Structures are given as C-alpha cells and as structure tokens.
Image (cartoon, rainbow, N blue to C red):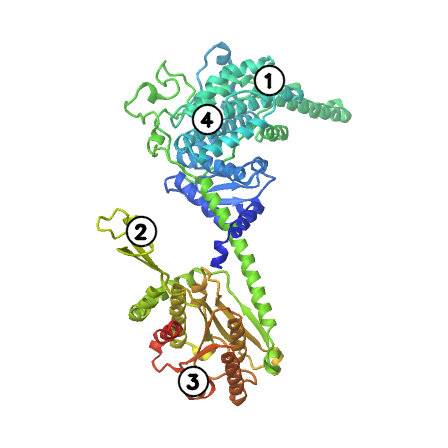
Amino acid sequence: MERQYKKQGYRSEIQSEKEQIRPEEVFCTLAYRNLMQSIIRELTDGRFNNVHLYFAPWENRMGWCDGKQVAINYGNALTAGFLTMVQKHLSLIGVTGHEGGHKNYSDFPLRQKYLDGILDGIWYPYPPEAENQQESEDLEQIKGYFDRKDKNALALIVQVAAYLHNLLEDVYVEEKMCSRFPGSVRRGILLNRERNAELIPSVRELLEEQEDNLSILMNLCGQYALSGRINNWDGLENDLLEKMKELMPVIREGREKEGSSIRYLVVNRIILKIWKYLYEIIHEMESQREEQQKEEDDGGNEAGKEQGEGDAQPEAQESSKENPNGQTSDLTDTQEVSSAMQEYLAHLVSMIPHLTENEEEKGVFLGFPEDVPWDGAWEQDTPGTRGTYISAEKKEGTEGDAGENSEADAKPGSTEEVDAEERFQVLLWEMAKERVDARINAEINRSLQKEMDGIDFDAGHRKVKKVVCRQYEITEQQKEQYRKYQEQVKKVQRRLRSAILPILQEQRARTERYLFMGRRVDMRSIASPQGAIYRKQYPGKKVDMAVSILIDMSESMKGKRMEQAKLAAFCLYDFCRKAGIAVTIYGHHTDGFPHRRLEDETVYLHCCAEFDPDKNDGCRIAALRPDGANRDGVALKFIGEKLLRRREAQKLLILISDGLPNSNRYNGEPAKKDLAAIRKELMGGGIVFVAAAIGADKKKIREIYESSFLDISDIEKLPITLTQQIVKQIRRCWN
C-alpha cells in the first residue's frame, strides 16, 4: 500500500472521490459532528460543546439554541440553496457562530420572563414613554388592554414582541461574533445574510399580495434589521414607508447598543410606534366577535318570539353587563385566544423573515438585570429617573449600575481566527481517502483470493474452502497493542545491534571526501588549500532478497507462544523494511469444526503484510488471534507459490509452528508426507526453507523438514534467532 501512496494517481483518485461526496453523506457523520463540537467549543471558550445535527428540510429554521444545546438543521432550505459543498459548510458554520453568539451573549430566562410578563398584563422592564400626543393616546389604549388582560390583544402583542426581540438579538449577537471571529465564522454569517437578503420580497410585491399592514411592516423591519436596507427598488411612497423611516434609528439602536435590557426597551418603543397597525388587527377581531355575538343574540330573540311575547326577558337583562366600576365590559374580554386570532398569528409568522428560532431555556429565572428597573409599573416617574434606555449610559459607576456592557465584559473580547474551512477540507480528504483505501483493499482482497483460487492443489487440499482475509478497518485497541509491541521490538534490536548495524551500514551508499587523488572533484572542498579536492563514491550493496513468514494460528498457539511468534514477526518485518528486503507475513488456521466432508472445512489465511508495505501492517500483526486447527499444506503451498513468482535472487520462507497438522483427515503420516513433498518442491524452486519449531512435536517436525528444521528451545529467543537467520542469508549472498 505504501507504493500506492507514492503514486500521483492515488492522490488524483482521492481528489476525484472527494468531488463525488454528497453533502448529506458528510453532514450526518460522527466526524462532522465532532468538527462542529470543537468549533462551538472554541466559540464559547470551552463552556459549551453540545451540538445536535439533524436533517429536516420541512422546517422553516436553520437551527436553534436553548441554552443547553445547539441544534443545526443541515437540511434547511437556505443552506441547500448553495451550490458547492464548501458554501453549504460555510453556511452551517454561520449558523453555528450565530447560536454560539446566543450562548455567549443572550439571556434566555430573562427573555422568557419578558414574554410571560406581557401575557400576564405586565410590560417589562417598563412601558415606553410617549414622545407626542398620538403616542400618549396610543399608550393609554394599550394600558387598557394590559389592565384587563385581553387575551386576543396580548397574544398579538407578545407575538410581535417575540419576533422583534429575536430579530434584534439575532443581529446583535451576530455582530458580536463577526467582530470577535473574523475568519470562517464571519464569512458564514455574512453568507447567510446575503442569501436572506436575496430572498426578501420588494415592497411592491408585498402590496400586490394584498397583505395586511402589520405583516408588511414586520417584513420591512426584518429586511432592515438583517440587511440595513429595504427592498424598495422602484421608489414607492406610502404610510408604511414613512413609519419605517421613523423606526430605522430605533432598530439600529437595538442591534448595536450594549446592555441587558436595551433590546427589550427598544421592542417596547417599536410596539408603541406601530400600535396603529396592531390595533387594526385587534379591532378587526373585535368587530368579528361583535357580529358573531349579534347573530347569536338575534337567533335567540327569534326563538323567544315563537314561545310567546310573555316569555320575553327584560330589556335591561339583554343589554351588556356593567363591571364593578360601572364601565361596559368589552366583547373581546374572553378567556382564550380566538380561533381567528390564532389563524392570523400563524399567518404572521409565515410572512416575516428570520435567521433562526431559539427554544426557550428551561429552568429557574435567575433574577432581573441591574441596568434598569424591571418593575413593569405604568406610573410615569419624574423626568430623567429612568434614563433614556439604559441608566448605565448616563450614570456610569453609580450604585446599582452594572456598566454599559456587563454581560459582554464577562466574556473575552480578543479577536480569534477559527479556520473551519481548512479543517473541513481535511475532513473531506480523509473521508475520500478512506473510500479509496477501502476500494484498493477490496481489490487487493479480490486479487489475493483470485491468486489462491488459481493454485493447483492436491486432491485433499483442493476440496476444502480457502479464504484469504486482509483486515482494513483498524481499531484503536489494535493500534495500542501495536505501540506496546514496538517497545519490545526496540529491546530485541538493541540485543542484535552488533549483527544488524554492519549489514545496514554496508548496504548504504557512502562518499569519501577530501582525497588528494581521484576522478571526481568535490565541489564542496574546491577551495581546500591543501589540495584535497577529490571524492570517491562507494555504491553500497543491494540486498536482493524476498522473505515470507508464515505463522501457525491454531488453538495450541495460545498464550506465550502466540505472543512470541508475533514479536518475532514484528522484528523480522522491521528489519526487512530497514534493509530494503521485500517481506510478506501471513497467519493461518482452519474453522476448527469436525466436519464429515472435506468440502465443509474452511482454511483461513490472514494477510498481515504484503510485499508492498502498508501503514496498517503492524496493526494487523498485532490483531492475530489463535483459532481452530492447522492445515499447513494449504498455507505453505499458497505462500510458496507467491514467493516463487518473485524476481529476487534469494527467497526465504520461515514457518513458525508449535506442532504437526491436526485438521479433518489431515494428520499423522499422510500430513507428514504432504508437507515433505511441498518442502521439496519449494526448495527445488530455489527457496530457502526454515521451520521454527516451538512446541512439543519438535522431533516429528524435524523428520518432516529435515535440514530446514530450526529448534527453538527457548521461546524467548525466537525473535533474535529468526532475525539472525535472515542476517546469515544476507551474508551468504554478499560472500
């Protein structure tokens, strides 16, 4: 596999695969969720990393935050409208930055207290102050609805207030996040804003749709808050646009100023300024209710006439009832919001533009802020006692003053670069690389199996099933095991240093410099005053060798035998790689069941390392586990055939086993004769064969492999002894 990594075509294949990945394949992965969690952790100074990614294209929101988790809808229509994967990712980063801003700067319990207060007839922090006679009259009318807790009127007011506050809070936290995180976060936020601005209808379009004035006005407020402009390209003039000119500085105040209460006070002021348009809706609902009540009364009167005039009730009882103060009770004084108002509120929500919607944080209210009094009282204080909007602006440092930006001062204000785009590219590259590697490994497995199927086995071996396995997905546990083996390999290498170092040094090319005579001038020493300006190149010696290692993985290899066999395989693999020797490592075993028919038995050959190295070779060696029995003839025939096809001048096959074959109808004398024949065939092809015996059947193994037999009396010396066998073959080659 390492050669695959060095090929230019490999990188091109990964790049091509990367371009084929679809957004929904990336955004639903654990790797992408981890990426977003790390980003939100950075955006909130490590205080928050709970991110939920979900796909809901039918939802009219990009995400939400409830103070405990951030949810990102990667199927939202706005993100889906971008063409490239990077743009879609950047859009989601904008949503993440937006919601991170809410976590940093928004007070969800306070917002809930504000909205609940309106429904209870309390206008927090306190009602706005009228700036002219008309506003004074409107404020008195609003006070009437608050005093009698008119459900219809308060439902409309709270809906408008919730939208306006959410809008101003959205833009405010985005500006804060753009200022602090000028990289990917700012680009993502502005990208979403630009797309939202493109989708904003013009004033003429809204009028042509015959929308009510309040819906149009809320749309215009949204337009201006999000983009700083109104889509009035053809220059229309009407009352709504004049009202918007009056609201623009107020909206700018709400999106720019600091303070815990500023946006609530701004919303209260906007509601007073647009009361005319709220009252149009409320009055229409009241009129509908009056007509409905009149129809019901008329129907009752007709029924009474049929019963006789004597049954008629006194006129005084049919008239509207008076309340304890002697005032006539309004017909809209109902206990629940009317179905007509509910229908209108749903329509209003569908009309107004928005960035995201925030779920209210569940929990206990933590208390009012100290920048302004949150008494909700309607009585007008003496001029100047409440301040314009926020007392901290006029009385900085006074008692009860929390400062101009108390909640912002508690947050770090340094500018930070969060490069989410580069990390996303790395994620895409790794995802594409995994797919390409999976295809390559699948192709390698098919090739190995085809290689196995193409070998002409003897009758007994031909009948059994033969499966070549090459593990691709490596677990963290296997990686940890491999790291532990590496420490043991270093200890073995230290003991073999006197034998290994001369081999490796003699193998390398070297240059002798500062010679007085020679054929080649050494330009590095051309100015030598002594005249030692020549150099001589010694090419080094190439090790023209291929090594195959076959490990018995039967049940009898459990425990120390298997551990030492794997350690030996690690040492041999490491030395061969350093010496430039092609090496392959396999383990083998059967399924271990006592089948009646040979056709039902399966022989498994586990490919740990092929002649082309792969970064996971060591982990596959570490993953070897004993299982079943051993049918050595199949494994030796397969490995031997692979080795015979190599071009290297020297070929070495090392078998590590603890006993004789013990498989279905493959044991005793028939098995011994089969193995002896295979050994003779391999050696006849020029293979040097070494059978390392580490079990109790050494005598019988010696009878099979004869001169190829290697007695490992001390299993602890297995890695050193086998490495010395390779060193011996190298020296024979050079001599």
Amino acid type shown at disc 4: Ile
Q: Disc 4 to disc 2, how far (Cα)? A: 93 Å
Q: Which mark is residue 122?
A: 4
Per the rendering, the mark at residue 155 is none
In the picture as drawn, the residue positioned furthest to the left comes out as: 530
Tell me the crowding category of disc 3: few under 14, some 14 to 19, or many 20 or more residues within 10 angstroms, Cα based.
few
Please name the residue that numbered disc 3 is placed on.
707
In the rendering, at what x and y percent does residue 501 appear? 31, 66
- Residue 340 lies, in percent from the top left, at 64, 28
Distance, label 3 to label 1, CA atoms, is 97 Å
Q: Is residue 678 visible?
A: yes
Task: Answer with the quarter of the image where residue 103 lies.
Answer: top left
Left or right: residue 404 compared with residue 227: left
Q: Amino acid at mark 2?
A: Asp
Q: Are marks 3 and 4 in contact (CB under 8 Å)?
A: no
Which residue occupies the extreme top position in the image?
133
In the displayed structure image, the side of residue 497 where residue 12 appears, left or right = right
Q: Crowdedness of circle 1 by 10 Å Cα count: few (<14), some, many (20+)?
A: few
The quadrant holding residue 666 is bottom right
Distance from disc 1 to disc 2, alpha carbons, whole Å, reads 77 Å
Q: Position of residue 140 (x, y in %)?
A: 49, 16
Q: Residues within 10 Å of mark 4 (few under 14, many from 20)?
A: many
Residue that badge 2 annotates:
522
Q: Callout 2: helix, strand or loop?
A: loop
Name the residue type under label 1: Trp
- Mark 4: secondary structure: loop
Between disc 1 and disc 4, whose residue precedes?
4
Tell me the residue that label 1 is attached to: 233
